[in-house]
Amino acid sequence: MEEKINKEHQVCTSDGAIDSHGHPAVRKKTGDWVAAILILVNQGLATLAFFGVGVNLVLFLTRVMGQDNAEAANSVSKWTGTVYLFSLLGAFLSDSYWGRYMTCAIFQVIFVIGLVSLSLSSYIFLLKPSGCGNKELPCGSHSSYQTILFYVSIYLIALGNGGYQPNIATFGADQFDEGDPREQHSKIVFFSYFYLALNIGSLFSNTILNYFEDDGLWTLGFWASAGSAALALILFLCGTRRYRYFKPNGNPLPRFCQVFVAATRKWKAKVLQDDKLYEVDEFSTNEGRKMLHTEGFRFLDKAAFITSKNFKQMEESKCSPWYLSTVTQVEEVKCILRLLPIWLCTILYSVVFAQMASLFVEQGDAMDTRISRFHIPPASMSTFDILSVAVVIFIYRRVLDPLVARTMKSKGLTELQRMGIGLVLAIMAMVSAGLVEHFRLKNAIEDCNECEGSSSLSIFWQVPQYVLVGASEVFMYVGQLEFFNAQTPDGLKSFGSALCMTSISLGNYVSSLLVAIVMKISATDEMPGWIPGNLNKGHLDMFYFLLAALTAADLVIYVLMARWYKYIKFQGNNDNGINKEDPEVGL
C-alpha cells in the first residue's frame, strides 16, 4: 500500500507541464486547486485595485480634471480600450519569450508602480483646493505638467493590468491537466470561478472605495487600490514552487508566414482529398499537441502538400519550412482564421458592456440618489451587476446546465450557444436602459438651479439594466474565455485569452467613436446632441435604443458565423473538452 501511494505521488502530468525547477510536473505536488485558488485570490485583489480606479474614473475626470460628460465618457472608453489592447502585448511576450508566470509578475510590478504614482500625484497636485473633488466642490485647473503626470500614471496602470490580465486566466487553466478526467472538468469550472473572483474583487471597489471616492476622498481610494495590488503580487509570488509551467514556443509570426509562403509557392498544385499531407512523427514537449486536418481553406493545404521537389529536399535533409509546412502549422493558421469572424461579432457586445463604466454612471448621477439622508454613489450601482454575475454563475452551473444536458441528452450548452444568449440579454439591457432614461426625462427637475440636470426618478430604476448586463456577462465573457482557450493551438493559449480582452478594448474604442459620431449628427441649434453635459437637454434614451438595434443586427451575423464554425481537433483527443454533440458544428 505504501509503495502504491508513493507511485501515485510520483505520477507526472500528461500535458508536458514542468515544475519551478524545470522537471516534469508531478500531479500530486503541483498545480490543481491549491495553485488555482492562489491565482483566484490574486485575481480578486488585482481586480479590486483596478476597479478602484476605473469604476469612478469618469467622475474623477469631470470633478477633478474639469472635463464635460461626453469628453469624460470618451476618455474612459479610450483608457479602458487601451487596457485591453495591451493584453495583446502581454500575450505575445508570454507565448513567445517570457512564459506566463514571468509575464504576470513583470506586468503586476508595473501595475503597482502606476497606482502608487496616481496616489502621489492626486495627493500632491490634483486635489487642489483641499476638499475638492466631490459633487459640490470641483477642483481648480491644472498645469500641463500635472495633467501629463496624471495620464502617465493611469496609462501605466493600463499597461500593467492589460499585460497581466490574459496571462493570469491562462496560467490558472495551466494548473489543470486535460489528460486527467477530474482535472479536465476542474479546468472548465475554473473559468466560471475566475470570472466570479473578478466580480467579487470589484464588489469591494464598487461599494466601499466607491463611496469614499464619490465623497471626494480620492487619495484614500487610490492608496487602498495600490495596497491591494501589492498584496496580490506578494500572494502570486508565494505560489512559485507550487505552480505548473509551460515553456514558451517562440514567436508564432514566422510559423504563420511560412504557411502562406509555402502555399503561395505551390499555388498551381492540385491537392486531392486523399492526398497525404506532411506531418512530423514526433513533437518536442514544448511544441504542444499535433492537430488533425480539417476541411476548409483548401488553399492553405498546399503548404503541407509534398511535391516531388519537396520529396527530393527531404531526402537530402534540406527541406525548409518556407517550402513545406506541417499539417499542425496549417491548422494553426486555419484555427485563427476561423476564430476571427466569431471574435469580430463579440466587439459590439463590448460596446454595450462599456456603457456601465461611463453612460450608466452619468445617467445615475442625474437621478435621485438619496435613501432618506444617505447618498448612493452612482458608480456603486454596478454592485447589482456583480451580484447578478454571482447568482447567474451559480444558477447556470448548478441548475441550467445540468437541466439542458438531461433535456437535450448532450453535455449542455456549447460556448457558442452561450455567447449567443449573452447577445440577446445585452439587447434587453439596452432596451431597459433606454426606457429608464425615457421616464427619467419625463421626471426631470426643471425649476431648481442647484439641481440642474437632475431628475426625481430614483436611481434604483437602473437595477434591471445592471442585472441584465451581469447575466449577459456570464454567458458571453465566461463562454468567450472557455471558447478561445479551447480553440487556440497549444502555443497560443495566452493569445486566445487576449482575443477576449481585445474584444473589450475595441468595444470601448467603438463606443468612443459612436458617441462622437452621434454627438456630431444629433447636435442642432435647439439641442446640443443626444449626450450633452446636462442630460435633461439631450436624448440619451435614443442612444441606448440605437445600441439595441445595432446589437440585434450583430446577433443575426453572429448566428450565421457560429453555424459556419468548425471546432479544432487534436490527435488522440476527439472531445477537446468542448461541450458539444458534433465536433464539426458550431451551433
Image (cartoon, rainbow, N blue to C red):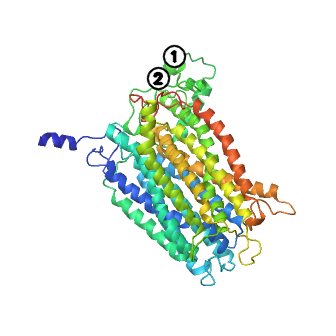
Tell us which disc is closer to us: 1 or 2.
1
| Type of amino acid under label 2 | Met
Q: How many marks?
A: 2
At x 30%, y 43%, the residue is 24
At x 58%, y 70%, the residue is 377
Give SS at disc 1.
loop
Q: Which mark is residue 195?
A: none
Report the front residue among 102 and 75. Answer: 75
494 versus 298 height, above or below: below
Left or right of 46 on screen, residue 465: right
Residue 535, by quadrant, is bottom right
508 versus 455 height, above or below: above
Q: Is residue 247 visible?
A: no
Q: Which mark is residue 314?
A: 2
Few, some or many residues within 10 Å of mark 2 (<14, 14–19, 20+): some
The picture places residue 475, in percent across and down from the top left corner, at 52, 45
369 versus 384 height, above or below: below
Write down the residue under mark 1.
275
